[in-house]
Structures are given as structure tokens and as C-alpha cells.
Amino acid sequence: MTSSPIELAQVSKSFGAVQALRGVSLTVAPGEMFGLIGHNGAGKSTLFKLMLGLLPATSGTVRVQGVDTASPEFRQVRRRIGYLPESFVTYDNLTGLEVLHLFADLKHVPRSACAGVLEQVGMSLAAGRRVHTYSKGMRQRLGFAQALLGDPDLIFLDEPTNGLDPEGIADFYRILREVRERGSTIVITSHILAEIQDRVDRLVIMHSGKIAEQGTLAQLRSRMVLPSQIVATLRPGTADQLQAALAPLDGPELRLDGAKATIACQSGEKMAVLAVLAKLALDVTIHEPTLEQLFLGHGGAHVHAH
């Protein structure tokens, strides 16, 4: 049986009187893309550092690739982990290729692998330029390249699309798909929730150092009971018929604006509402609750839909 790449059991972390993590338990499956979201100060960065073995837990256990991060053996495991921090800082007077040579040496990866990952992230033409000439987006691509060195089995990405333009973001997720196809497990955080909501297999919502919710997006939608929004363009003269047809259903909330009808309803009412609209509407669009709405339901802030 294959062990889980990440297993946390009742993990807490304190910094003096400040408790950054409180009884966090989670498991990430092999090959999974796992999302980690939360407001600033929710404990995401601390959790990342514990999983990378950069900080010890105050209590509980953290196992990565089957090895306790507090054990001496974890040093070998860390070399098979890719990590892109939120702010990738390196030596500005080195060239991009020289930076990768440095990381390759630290990871015990052949320097010959560096040119390939630079090409993979679209940085081949800038490989010989010094980093101080790079734009923010180019620095982020370089950081992504070092995270991919050595074809890691497990990759941690902290706000990985910071500084990337739309084309760069599309390239990033294309490369990530290729990495996943090779079987790598990925843990990702992002403030741009619309980017990750259709890409992660499961996710955790952190709040005040604890896990507020975890599961698939569908599971979170079901548990939090947020309504779907159905927007319909009505046939002429059917608004009164729609109101009458929805009245017995009791639950749906209807807003009318001329020929446009917006209906908020729970998942159990959706098919009944659609059956009514099939007779009265020219066009129907369904908007399911977004990850941003789920996050804000747990007191999240400082996030962006786009």
C-alpha cells in the first residue's frame, strides 16, 4: 500500500504565547493537487514550514513521504521536494542559469538538468542574463524552475502566480498539468481563488490556526448550504406564470428585472426550478457557489475573484 505523501496528526505550533496552529490533522493523497487557503495570519505559512521541515511542531506529528519531519532521515526526503515560496529571493548578480546551478548543487541534481527546466518555464532566452535585469514575472518563472529541478515527487507552491501576466498564468497551469501527469503531488496556496477552484482535487480552509473546512469543492458547497443562482431570460409575458409556479416550492427566492429572472435556490430545489423554466425561459444560466463565497463564509478576507 502506498503511503500518503503528507500526513498531519493533531499538529499545533506556538510562538511564545501565540498559537499559530491548533490541532491540525490532514492527509494528502498521492498525485493529488491540494489547495490550502485562508486569510492573512490563518496559519498557512506556518503549516508550509512544518511540512517542509523548516519548523518543528510544538505537538503532534508531521510525516512527509512516510518520514517524520523531525527525524534526521528527513534531510534526504527534502531533496525530493520542490518549493516555491511566496517571495522568491535570490542573488541578483548571478545569471538565471547560475542561480539554478546553485539550487541544483543544493539538491544534488546534475547541473545539466538546469537548461531543461529553464526551457520548460519559458526562460531559455534569459538564462544568461543577470537576475537584477528580470521583471517580477521573470523572477517568478525562475523560482518555479528551481522548484521543478530534479522532477520532485512533491511540490509546495505558495502564491505561485504572483507577478505573472495572464499569458504567464496560463503557461504556469499548463506546466503544472504536465507535472501532475508524471504523478507528482502538489500543495498550492493562492489568494486568487477563481484560479484554483476548478484545478484542485481537494482543499482546506484555514481560520485562526485551525481547519475550518476541508474536502472537495462539491462537498464544501453541500455542507455550507449556499444557494445556486439561476439566471433566466423569460419568454414575453411569462413573469407572472413564473411567480405562480415557484410559489408552491417555498424555498427559491425570485428577483425580476424586466425579462431577466434571478432565482436563488438550494441544490434540492434546483431540478424543480429548471423544470419550470424549461417551459417559460428562452435561456438559462446556472451559477454554483464559488470558492470565494465559501471562503468568505468562514470569515475570509483579502481574496480576489479574478
Image: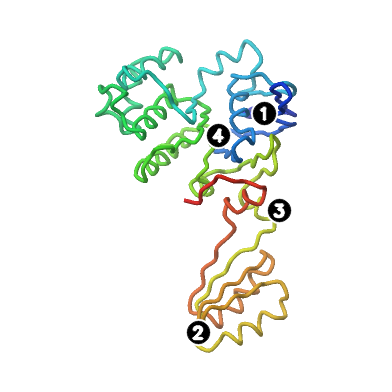
Give the alpha-carbon distance from disc 4 to disc 1, as whole Å. 13 Å
Residue 47 quadrant: top right
Q: What percent of the width, then of the height, locates residue 82?
A: 49, 25
Q: What percent of the width, then of the height, locates residue 177?
A: 44, 40
Which mark is first along the chain, 2 or 3?
Answer: 3
Do the residues under discs 4 and 3 have CB atoms within 8 angstroms? no
Of 263 and 178, which appears nearest the observer? 263
Q: Residues within 10 Å of mark 3 (few under 14, many from 20)?
A: few
Residue 38 quadrant: top right
Q: Residues within 10 Å of mark 2 (few under 14, many from 20)?
A: some
Q: Secondary structure at mark 4?
A: strand
Which mark is first along the chain, 1 or 2?
Answer: 1
Give the alpha-carbon distance from disc 2 to disc 1, as whole Å. 55 Å
Amino acid carrying mark 1 in the image: Glu
For disc 2, the marked residue is 235
Amino acid carrying mark 3 in the image: Arg
Q: Secondary structure at mark 2?
A: loop
Q: What percent of the width, then of the height, locates residue 286?
A: 54, 66
Query: Given this view, does label 2 or label 1 mark the residue nearer the observer?
Result: 2
For disc 3, the marked residue is 223
For disc 1, the marked residue is 7
Res. 219 in view? no
For disc 4, the marked residue is 187
Residue 247, compared with residue 264, is above or below; it is below
Q: Residues within 10 Å of mark 1 (few under 14, many from 20)?
A: many
Give the alpha-carbon distance from disc 1 to disc 3, as whole Å. 24 Å
Amino acid carrying mark 2 in the image: Arg
Q: Is residue 93 left or right of residue 200?
A: left
Give the alpha-carbon distance from disc 3 to disc 2, as whole Å. 35 Å
